[in-house]
Image: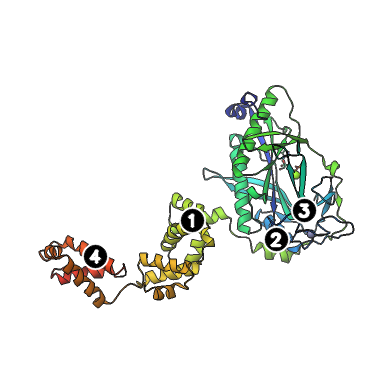
Amino acid sequence: MTVASTELVDYDEVVSRYEPVMGMEVHVELSTTTKMFCGCANHFGAEPNTNVCPVCLGLPGALPVVNAAAVESAIRIGLALNCDIAPWGRFARKNYFYPDQPKNYQISQYDEPIAVNGHLDVPLDDGTTWRVEIERAHMEEDTGKLTHLGSATGRIAGATTSLLDFNRAGVPLVEIVTRPIEGAGARAPEIARSYVTALRDLLRGLDVSDVRMDQGSMRCDANVSLKPVGAAEFGTRTETKNVNSLKSVEVAVRYEMRRQAAVLDAGGEIVQETRHFHEDGYTSAGRRKETAEDYRYFPEPDLEPVAPSDDLVERLRATIPELPWLQRNRIQQEWGISDEVMRDLVNNGVIDLVTATVAEGASSEGARALWGNFLVQKANERGVTASELAITPTQVAAVLKLVDDGKLSNKLAREVIEGVLAGEGEPEQVMTDRGLAVVRDDSVIQAAVDDALAAQPDIAEKIRGGKVQAAGAVVGAVMKATKGQADAARVRELVLAACGVAG
Ligand code: ADP
Ligand code: MG
Ligand code: ZN
């Protein structure tokens, strides 16, 4: 099913007459070792139905226990989002029937979420920031995964077989819900994308989740409504589910704005419903929205309330890192590099590696040159990321120290790194074993100079006659003969001296 463009209002038209209101709901799977309420492994990509037990399969009589590590991650997320942490709160049962939900209820948090009333200052494309208010972040458990076979779309309609994998059932989730985002106007789609991007970067910095939208460890539902410009009351919203890339967040919001405007312009009404996002850039109607009553929430009787002490909260607060984009700005200033150079380092995933190398005493120029060029190239050749290479920031700093001490040239430094990557040991040892140190011994260089002059008598004659520029060819020959290990400046001095001219 595709939607004719005539059913969409031109975007500029939409924002001239309507004001969008958005609300983002983001689910993140926590990368804890075990699941939320049982000891099963929390591991993406395992053989189906191997990480399961009576608790996460919802077998009668099985009792859940709260995963403390998941609670700590949820509190850290709340703190990073400037939320208040609830000193006491119960889990709730959210009752509904669906085959991916073995217990026929999901353990979630309803009116007693762990974190409330926060905000995130989101960096936008033009360098300004937009404050998104956070209503709450709460803990819950993921459902199993249904795979429908036999239908063209992979959806249940038309499917002949459905497969169930309960490995994901009971994986810890944190859902982060914004307050309505108002006043964004034409920038609404960009702000939605920027918010999800910032949230992803923040969660990655906290090291609480893989935040892989493509693998579903971060999932975004985008609520959108329109109201006539100047109107006080919000319009009816739709909720586009499981938008699975950053770009798609922007596309989905923009599409819903244009579609809803067409419905409203035609005198129609927006129905409160969920909508499916399609990769080719449109949304289609899903189910009518349930109300809270449909879920018959009540406090979960099988679990103790979560009551984090002030002490615990303060200890966790001390672990919250600087916001990644603020850290990037600070680092860029410290290193004195352009936006472009910074962007390359970020895109190559080497910022942390360069930072760690600098922390080991290296200059930022030296560390950037090796990680940003040579090591990224080595990583690409091997099909891994720079951080997966078999060399540490400490070792790179050691190589740079050898360069600073005049023991290695830049070229030899790269050969030492090759040796480290090949598992030949620490930099100093590779340098010795491969015989790579810069040749300081004048007698060795002198012999090479004499040979080179003897091999090119006409050039030697020119130099003796005062054509000092001609020395370059001899220096080059000596460097080649010494495999680049001689100090080029010293070679030049010795060549000129041998020809009886001053440098
Ligand atoms: P539900 O459980 O129905 O999805 P939530 O409260 O979890 O409801 O999330 C609804 C999201 O939509 C929130 O981010 C909220 O701020 C936002 N929202 C609420 N009303 C509107 C509206 N009229 N238009 C756009 N977004 C809205
Ligand atoms: Mg919701
Ligand atoms: Zn289990």
Which residue lies under the disc numbered 1? 380
User: How far apart are the alpha carbons under marks 4 and 3?
Assistant: 68 Å
Asked if marks 3 and 2 touch (Cβ < 8 Å), the reply is: no
If you read the primary sequence from the N terminus, does the residue marked by circle 4 or circle 1 appear first?
Answer: 1
Which residue lies under the disc numbered 3? 166
Q: At 41% across and 69% down in the image, what residue appears?
A: 416
Amino acid type at image mark 3? Phe
User: How far apart are the alpha carbons under marks 4 and 1?
Assistant: 33 Å
Residue 227 in the image: above or below residue 192: above
If you read the primary sequence from the N terminus, does the residue marked by circle 3 or circle 2 appear first?
Answer: 2
Instruction: Point out residue 479 in the picture as x, y percentages from the top left corner.
Output: 27, 66
Q: Circle 3 sits in a helix, a strand or a loop, which is it?
A: helix
Which residue lies under the disc numbered 4? 477
Q: At 55% across and 54% down in the image, what residue appears?
A: 326
Q: Is residue 350 left or right of residue 184?
A: left
User: How far apart are the alpha carbons under marks 2 and 1?
Assistant: 30 Å
Amino acid type at image mark 4? Ala
Which residue lies under the disc numbered 2? 32
Q: Circle 1 sits in a helix, a strand or a loop, which is it?
A: helix
Q: Circle 4 sits in a helix, a strand or a loop, which is it?
A: helix
Q: Which residue is more in the foreground, 153 or 215?
A: 153
Q: Residue furthest top?
A: 266
If you read the primary sequence from the N terminus, does the residue marked by circle 3 or circle 1 appear first?
Answer: 3
If you read the primary sequence from the N terminus, does the residue marked by circle 4 or circle 3 appear first?
Answer: 3
